[in-house]
Amino acid sequence: MPSFTIPGLSSGQNTNDLVRKLVDVESKPIRRWEKENEHNKIQIRAWSELKNQTTNLQIKTKNLTSFTSPFASKKITANEDGYITGEAGKGAKAARQEVEIIQLASRNKIAGNKIPTDTKIPAGKFSIISKYKRVNIDFPGGDPEKLGEKIRITASQVARASVTKVDSDNIVISLTAIQYGKESALKFLDPDGVLQTAGLVGENVPEPPPNTSNISLLIENSNPYLPEKYAGNAESPKPILTADGIEIKSNCAYVFPIDRQKIARTSILELTVNTGEEAKIIEFLGLGIVYDTKEGEKTKFINIEHKDGKYIFPLSEYAREQTLIKFILANTSEMNVKIQSLELSNPGDIKGASVTNEVVAAQDAIFKIDGIQLTRETNENIRDAIEGTALTLLKETQNPITLEVISDTKKGINMIREWVDAYNNLLKFSREISATNKDDKVDKSNASNENPELDISQDFWTNKNKSGILAGDPTLMRLIVGLKTAVGASYPSSTEPRFKVLSDVGITTGDPGSSWKQIQEGFLTINDSELQNALSEYPESVRELFASDTNEDNRFDDGVGITILETIKPYTQFTSGIVSSKVKLAESQMQENNKKIRDFESHLVNYEKKLKQKFEYMEQGIGKNKNIGTYLNQSIKQMKANNEQ
């Protein structure tokens, strides 16, 4: 190992500076790789932004080509505000009609008499009925506030209850029906006098007996229900007829055909079974129905709790005014059950106890359309009065008002404008990042990975900066060409008038008188009046221009929008798309360059160490030579001095 020396002391040269300069020359490949990484980072940002732009255009285009596109949108207007509003669907037809609102629907409201706040209300049962719904309440007894709270919690599906203190000593209970309409008027059964004590109703009128009829289950035509779920059906594919009834074994389920039965508005099914074991019941049984509708057969299957000795299926809640054709029973218990009876029950006409004070009578909405009087039980969402519309009545009219269903072009124009903006932004961005500087030559002659000692010329990076970051990329050029081709093409149309090109609806690549250079740029412009007219008069023709079904398979396969979507699809795909592949390639190049940089930095450390050793040996050699020279000079001088003596 060489002895310690001070750099440059013997040679008179700054050897540290020489080493630094030599190492700097040697490190030029690192700077090239770092430059490439910087360039790749910018490219990744450019590709990512391109993907954002194409995704935005994809979203805007899908909005125009979907089955819920805005071109056929309509709206409802009235010549006087505050009386009627509504929404018009795609099926609504343009129309102008006279509407007169004679009476609004109301919710029944009753109030009790004043009673002392400390009134003791007895325990007992009572029922509240509104339209098809009935709530049975078992009150444990207590004061009026406790009764009001019990009704509020238990009967919330039929009525709202409130308790008002009219003064320090008296209280009033009031009830308001949840539903509007005459048929939703509140009725009360109060056999134990609970509501009568609370001042709400008068003398109770007993409930009439229901009309019941037995339903025969056709055992010979029965079939297992969901056999993959109920394993017992494998051993017992049919129910067993015994002297005590139809036996259903454990973990079995069957569908029984029955004679067709019309389901009334208040119909229920009552099933009675026994288990053959005294005092043992099955808490829940699976009961279901199959009923016939205009759309075909439908099935409803639910678990029913055992109550008052029966299982009661509320037919009217699921299949009101439909036709019952089959009955389903599933036994998931560990015991066998026997069907003793199955009855269709329709409650009698309940009059109930008379109410004490009717604050608001239950009434239906009455209105006229072009002189024809209509009655509905609600003021809101009336869908069957004018085809394709949903009307809401707000206030009674003094005179007829004019209601119009007209095309709503505002939404369509806004969505087309957003689509044009997205298209123009993507086209502009694509052109900017792919533009090539043609004023200077790009010199790559001295840049290669095989010759890392050579540096890329400054001209190369200068011209890179003057050009777009993705200049000359063929995939980007294909995108620009594809977009321009899509918006400039002609498309088939089957609806008159036949809009085949975008210019037919006022969307062009330049206003009249525009320069050829502006037209070549390809940016779209909108003639508002032409587009407004096209959407107002011929919305279906505009829709076909953007998306049409040419082979009648209920799928859009042609049009400006469909072609645009196909053009940009490779650029928006998440994993295998063009952009994702380009980003992955740039990232892999950066990783490879980073590895090269790390390896070359290790080489530079050794290279610098060797240079310092060589200069150190040189300094030592020069030092030794100087010492020898000095010794020789002194020896010669001494010899001359001795000779002179």
Image (cartoon, grey):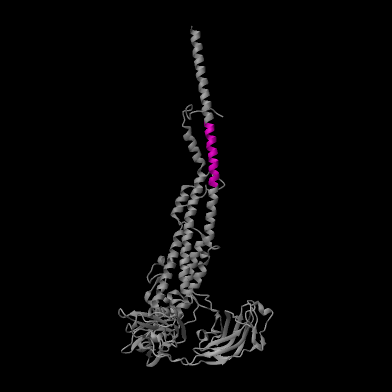
In the image, residue 468 sits, relative to residue 516, either above or below, namely above
Q: Is residue 385 visible?
A: no
Figure quadrant of residue 174:
bottom left
Q: Residue furthest right?
A: 235
Residue 242 point in image, percent of width and height: 67, 87
Residue 225 at x, y = what percent?
62, 81
Q: Is residue 289 left or right of residue 35?
A: right
Magenta segment includes 604: yes
Q: Dividing the image into 4 quarters, which one contains the N terminus?
A: top right
- Compare residues 25 and 512 and report the one nearer the observer: 25
Residue 265 position (above or below residue 35): below
Q: Nearer the viewer, residue 292 or 303?
A: 303
Residue 452 is situated, as x and y percent measured from the top left of the image, at: 54, 45
For this rendering, which residue is in front, 423 or 1?
1
Q: Can residue 14 be seen here?
A: yes
Main secondary structure of the magenta stretch: helix
Count of numbered circles on the image: 0
Q: Is residue 326 left or right of residue 350?
A: right
Q: Position of residue 287 (x, y in %)?
A: 57, 82
Which region is colored magenta?
596-615
Q: What residue is drawn where x is 46% and y is 53%? A: 464
Magenta segment: does it hold 608?
yes
Q: Residue furthest top?
A: 645
